């Protein structure tokens, strides 16, 4: 049975999962909720995602929600398909600890600030609402305050979890691209943050991201 991805085609968290499916070349079927009828808040949806959010997957009867958990599951279950996205030796305690560290770095030092900006300046606009300038300024300040740390990290290694590409690098794509569209150069300023810019240019130019960044295709 083909894996089913339940999400809107333009949802950032759904795109985070879809890019991994494309990178790993895993066939899937996209199933979008009816936004007008608020299907993602319906009882049938809540049975699979109790918080009424997206995405979730159904992989031959195994249901999983939360995009980062889904990504790790796909990268692990389908390790031999497409691009390898795990440390070379998953039995290496130190390598796996570095991977966990990289996951934590993104959720603690990037997502809260980039997500805050996206919420105020993109998602609220979609909903016909005005951005809160105070919250935007706070999120911008928080993002700027983390860039030196990312620059130092990427000066020592090629990717977020070491010198090999992993699924963690893909975590940044939806919000990073969203920030670019909004005119922020946090990830592209080659003169101030050359290592961030080098990493971002490579990761954001992957064919898998080009395939899903505007809208997730209905299938692969």
Image: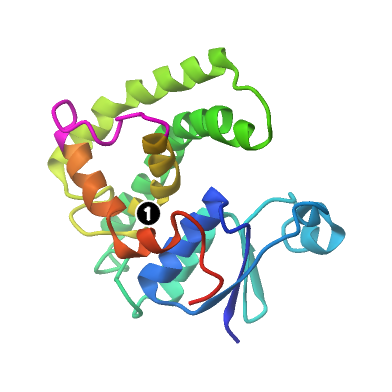
Q: Looking at the image, is 150 positioned above or below residue 60?
A: above
Q: Label 1 crowding class (10 Å Cα cut-off): few <14, some 14-19, many 20+?
A: many
Q: Position of residue 70 (x, y in %)?
A: 53, 62
- Between 102 and 15, the residue placed more toward the observer is 15
Identify which residue is drawn at 26% across, 45% down: 200
For the view shown, which residue lies furthest in the bottom direction? 1
- Give percent across and percent down for residue 40: 76, 55
Residue, x 40% and y 33% (percent of image)? 109
Q: Residue furthest right?
A: 43
In the image, which residues are magenta? 182-194
* 42 is within the stretch colored magenta: no
Q: Is residue 89 left or right of residue 120?
A: left
Residue in the picture at 25% in, 36% down: 188
Q: Is residue 74 above or below residue 194?
A: below
Q: Position of residue 183 (x, y in %)?
A: 37, 30
Q: Which residue is mark 1?
A: 170
- Color style of the picture: rainbow
- Seen at 14% across and 41% down, the residue is 156
User: Residue 201, image x and y in percent?
Assistant: 23, 47
Magenta region, main secondary structure: loop
Label 1's element? helix
- Marks counted in the figure total 1
- In the picture, the quarter occupied by the N terminus is bottom right
Q: In the figure, is residue 145 to the left or right of 220?
A: left
Residue 191 lies in the magenta stretch: yes
Position of residue 94 relative to residue 113, above or below, is below
> Horizontal placement of 123 versus 112: left or right?
right
């Amino acid at each position: 049975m083909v894996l089913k991805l339940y999400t809107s085609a333009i949802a950032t968290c759904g795109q985070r999962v879809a890019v991994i499916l494309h990178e790993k070349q895993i066939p899937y079927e996209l199933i979008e909720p009816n936004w007008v009828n608020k299907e993602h808040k319906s009882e049938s949806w809540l049975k699979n995602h109790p918080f009424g959010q997206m995405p979730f997957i159904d992989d031959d009867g195994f249901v999983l929600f939360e995009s980062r958990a889904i990504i790790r599951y796909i990268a692990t279950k389908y390790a031999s398909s497409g691009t390898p996205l795990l440390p070379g030796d998953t039995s290496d305690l130190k390598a796996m600890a570095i991977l966990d560290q990289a996951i934590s770095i993104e959720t603690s030092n990037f997502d809260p600030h980039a997500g805050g900006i996206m919420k105020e300046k993109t998602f609220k606009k979609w909903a016909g609402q005005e951005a809160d300038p105070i919250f935007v300024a706070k999120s911008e300040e928080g993002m700027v305050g983390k860039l030196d740390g990312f620059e130092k990290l990427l000066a020592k290694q090629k990717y977020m979890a070491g010198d090999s590409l992993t699924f963690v690098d893909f975590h940044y794509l939806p919000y990073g691209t969203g920030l670019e569209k909004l005119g922020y150069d946090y990830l592209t300023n080659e003169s101030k943050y050359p290592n961030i810019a080098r990493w971002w240019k490579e990761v954001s130019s992957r064919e898998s991201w080009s395939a899903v960044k505007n809208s997730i295709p209905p299938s692969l």
